[in-house]
Amino acid sequence: MSRKFFIGLLVIVFALAGLSLLTGCAKKEVRTDMPAPAVKADEKGAAGLTEAQLREQQLKEELARKRMMFLNEMVHFDFDKSNIRPDAAEVLKRKAAWLNENPNVGVIIEGHCDERGTDAYNLALGQRRAEAAKKFLGALGVAATRMETISYGEERPLDPGHSETAWAKNRRAQFVIK
Amino acid sequence: MRRHSLVWAILVLLAVGLTAASPALARVYIDINAPYARQFPVAAPELKRLGGQGGAEEARQLIGLVAADLDFSGLFRILDPKGYLEDQAKSGLTAAETNFQAWTMIGAEFLVKGGFTSDGPTFSCELRFFDVRLGQLLVGKRYSGLVADWRLMAHKFADEIMHQVTGEAGVFQTRLAFVGNDTGHKEIYVSDFDGHGLRQLTNFRSISLDPTWAPDGRSLAFTSYKDGQPFLYRLDLATGGVQRLSSYKGLNITPAFSPDGDKIVVALSKDGDPELYMLSRSGQIIRRLTETPGIDVSATFSPDGSKIAFVSNRHGGPQIFIMDLAGGNIRRLTYEGNYNTSPCWSPRGDRIAYVSMVNGLFNIHTITPEGGKPQQLTLDQADNENPSWSADGRMIVFSSNREGSNALYVMTANGGHVKRITRSKGKQTSPSWSGRLWD
């Protein structure tokens, strides 16, 4: 009886271990812009993923995360300025790294301004911001032919608010993958 | 509207100038250079029926619109009809039949009188403008047309009155073009100078900006993203047709027509950063005007066509500069404030309106082309932007958010007599005031 008990206990322990692996995968948030997890909880049974499959899963998630970061991380500017600040330079370095890892991708760099000031002047300022980001990336080795620029001036704010915070968010260069 | 233009061409030529006693105007009524603008009291009694049966409502509105136009100019004060003393039944329409004393007694210095007839679809009126103190007819006109033409008749006569009093025709037949976002997208709209007759001209459901009148009033240039990039287009007002004018890589923005309409100065960024270029009417580049790194944008022509004022940030923040189109000679105009944009040169040539950011707020200023101390016109705790001059240089239309969402307002050249022009929901911005369309 104690042997049966011991085997039963082992089965339970393994089952629990397997279950925790599976629930760990299945519970990952599935966002619409991410690829669905490679493994569904009900397909694999109690043993869980193999090492290789797990690594592949993690790699896919990492690529998706990096792509989201590329798109969502903005390059910010001071009011009425188009020079690249040190913090913006760091962002651009990450963007250059991603572009080097994805050599077949072309991008559109959008230049934007906050709502203050003249519409026409802001169209020009937005253009300068987009060009400044493009030039910085060019100096980091990204081919100019991969990058187009367009200015939207103050016409497409990220944040519709009227505060300093909103304005700071809107003064940006934003990247779109072609 | 334009569909009557041929009929009008004939009828206006037939418009009888009713006998005026004045040869060349001896009195200078309004000196534009006088610092204090006094308002002239004017009376405008109801028009007398001279015949026919219909048209009473139009006649009532016609004289009301003449009065409204005179009031709009800021030069006149309309006396309340309730105080009018002259017995309408006993008086006539000519000087001889007018009891000027009755008008002097209530303080009127000018008087508009008239009569009308209407037969079915047609409407005719005769209007007279008197100097009350001299007891003299200054100008009289007879207009004939359709009943619906009463607005145009009123505007034409108000323009005649302005001519008598200032030496220059009025601007009551001019139009405004501007950007409105009522539909959820920025589109181009047009209206009469007073906001009446609002019409949506574009429906691209994109971003359309900066409408600018060609000097002949037949077309508008504007920038739009309707084809995916900020290109420059021309819209023909008669046909509604839209034609691409400039579609270089990057920006194609801030069109400015030369006074003869032959050339357009635009800002293009195709060669690296936003610079000014002179284009032909059809969009061919004639030459490049600016060379410095940084932003050069928003040109405006002097009325003699020899110079432009424009915005450049070559010294740091945006400032207004002037250049001679023949020889360069680029010189800075604005030295007060760190952010000066949106220049618009008065058709009189002696002042340039622009926007200056002071303490985070945007206000309209004017400065002479020689530079010097600017004059601040708007003083509200609000943003006041995009100034555009009337054809006679007496008024400025601009966009302001002083009452909430941006709307268009008109003020006199000294910043007084502010009137709200647009009242639609949404924002109205970027106005352009047309020249006189009926020269």
Image (spheres, coloured by chain):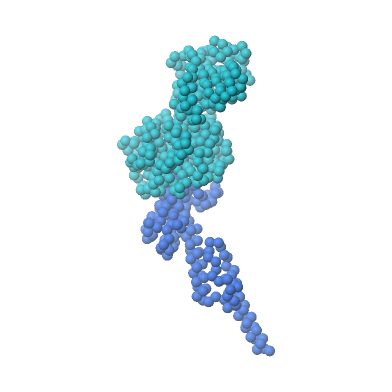
Chain colours: A blue, B cyan
| Residue that protrudes farthest toward the left in the picture | B327
- Residue at 37% from the left image edge and 49% from the top image edge: B272
Q: Residue A164: give x, y in percent of width and height.
A: 52, 49
Q: Position of residue B395 (x, y in %)?
A: 48, 30
Residue at position x 43%, y 41% in the image: B243
Camera-side residue of A19 and B60:
B60
Decide: is A174 above or below B284.
Answer: below
Q: Position of residue B426 (x, y in %)?
A: 56, 42
Q: Residue at x 54, y 41 (%)?
A: B427
- Residue A69 sits above or below residue A160 on the image: below
Residue farthest along the top direction in this orientation: B96
Q: Indicate the quadrant where residue A90 lies.
A: bottom left
Q: For the image shown, how many numbered marks are present on the structure?
A: 0
Give whichever of A24, B333 is nearer the camera. Answer: A24
Report the front residue among B53 and A94.
B53
The relative height of residue B131 versus residue B390 in the rendered view (above or below) is above
- In the image, is residue B414 above or below residue B124? below
Quadrant containing the C terminus of chain B in the rendered view: top left
Q: Is residue B428 visible?
A: yes
Q: Which residue appears farthest toward the right when viewing the image? A: A1
Any part of residue B346 in sight: no
Name the residue: 37% across, 48% down.
B270
Residue B199 x/y as whole percent: 53, 36
